[in-house]
Amino acid sequence: MGVALVQPIKALKSSVTLAYDTDYVYGGTQHYGLDWDYDGKGSIRAGYYDSNYTCGASVKLYGVMLDYALITNPVGITNRLGLRVQF
């Protein structure tokens, strides 16, 4: 269960999203996040959950979103790369 607050910033063609949710699996983990989106062309985000920090970015190239995320965890640092295509 979670909640998000989106605040448009029309002067900058962007929006800021503040989010919180709780995961009920494995004893419940709370997630906090902040995302800044610029005109649907890219975004930068940061988050925190279960003593781990996350950050990432997305860029829209030729209609495809390229996503990157860096996650700290007890094992080390995890890098994730992804592609999003909307049909």
Image (cartoon, helix red, strand yellow):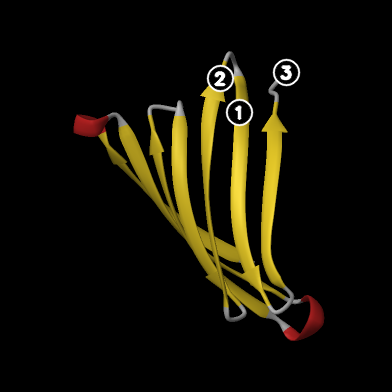
Query: In the rendered image, which residue does mark 3 sit on?
Result: 87
Disc on res. 61: 2
Marks 1/3 in contact by CB < 8 Å: the verdict is no
Three-letter amino acid code at the position of disc 2 = Leu
Q: Residue 83 at x, y = what percent?
A: 70, 32
SS label for mark 1:
strand
Crowd band around label 3 with a 10 angstrom C-alpha radius: few (<14), some (14–19), many (20+): few
Is any part of residue 47 visible from this angle?
Answer: yes
Q: Residues within 10 Å of mark 1 (few under 14, many from 20)?
A: some
Per the image, label 3 sits on a secondary structure element best described as: loop
Label 3 amino acid?
Phe
Q: Secondary structure at mark 2?
A: strand
Q: Quadrant of residue 18?
A: bottom left
Q: State the image quarter where residue 68 is shown.
A: top right
Instruction: Name which residue lies at 33% across and 35% down.
Output: 14
Figure quadrant of the C terminus: top right
